[in-house]
Image (cartoon, helix red, strand yellow):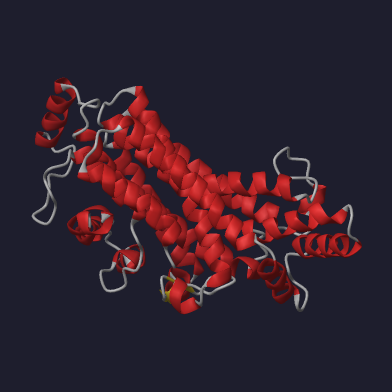
Amino acid sequence: DPFLLSKKDMETLSEGIRTDLIGTDHPVLTRAAAYFFDSNREGGKKIRPMMVLLLSRAMAISASASASSSLQQEQQHDEEEGLFTPPMPWQRPDLPAAQRRLAEISEMLHTASLFHDDVIDGSDTRRGEPSANAQFGNKTAILAGDYILARACIYLARLRNVETVETISTVIEHLVRGEVMQMRGSAAGDLNNTDDGVTPKNPLSYDHMIYYLRKNFYKTGSLMANSCKSAAVLGDYDDEIVHAAYRYGKHLGVAFQLIDDALDYEGSAMSLGKPGLADLNAGLSTAPILFALQEKEELSSSDAQGKREMEEIISMMKRKYRNNGDIERAVEYVNASDGIRKTKDLALVHVEVAVEAIMEHLEPSVYRDALVHLAYKVVDRSR
């Protein structure tokens, strides 16, 4: 079980971030920045740092991926010189400090993005608790997210690895790109009237599915993919291992978001830790409704009712489900289709690609097994 295997690491991760990485001399900013790292309200799964730590250990004991002695000596020297924080009493010392710090950075970047996303989306809850913007106000939440991001960048630079700095910096760019794509792709009129070369001009399910999957990679997959890649880079493993780590994170990240979008139609606010149907309420067209649209498109050439229903879905997408009854009607279309099942099936395809990547390039170990189990737990989860 990946959660049991990582239990000690995950229990202490937030404590390390709170005590080492995000303290300030301003009490309001400190409280806001530490809000989601508070042990009393930690509801997050910490998938990203868990992936980094499990993958780091799996690569370290893989026969085909041994780190060079010169790199190990350099890491030991860096720890002695104070470039990396030495393990605290609650931290496991059996992991290079750079990879341990990378796990913390990945969680900080994710948390900063949540602060900003909740302001943009106007969300009042997160992980079953009041969101940071509901607790502290939009301005403080934005500044707290900025501060966490800045602190993550400082500790990223202290890793003294140019490729890792470039890789994780790309994640930050992707997070912004993904948010802009989400806003443009769901904005009234943008579905047909954009000429940016990115937003789909035709309201066809295939075009929008490609756009949607690209957005999902930017918003979710990139952080997972590039965190895993960076763990391999910091371990000085060969290019095949680096690429396998990247593929594992990328496809698991896409699968994670697909399941999230399916659960948005299935789950309650209590089970999800956030309001159900949040995507439709935000005007977002995700995989379940896109698959429903695809089914209507396939019927439209030979069935008049199918064509009318296709046009109705397209109209609702264009106006962001703003009219009375739009959300209920969209749910009816999804429930009458195979949209949720197809979304989960697509997620499973990505999980299997992720698993194949590490099975092919990492030697058998308890940590590789945990990564495989973690991947399949993504598609079996209920929140």
Q: Is residue 23 visible?
A: no
What residue lies at 15% left-to-right and 26% top-to-bottom? 74
Side (left or right) of 148 relative to 11: right
Residue 170 locus on image (x, y percent): 47, 37
| Of 154 and 272, the residue lying toward us | 272
| Of 145 and 37, the residue lying toward us | 37
Residue 4 locus on image (x, y percent): 22, 59
**Does 183 sit above or below residue 312?**
above
Q: Is residue 265 visible?
A: yes
Side (left or right) of 203 relative to 242: right
What residue lies at 58% left-to-right and 60% top-to-bottom? 341
| Of 141 and 75, the residue lying toward us | 75
**Does 368 sit above or below residue 278?**
above
Q: Quadrant of the C terminus?
A: bottom left
| Of 380 and 202, the residue lying toward us | 380
Residue 50 locus on image (x, y percent): 29, 51
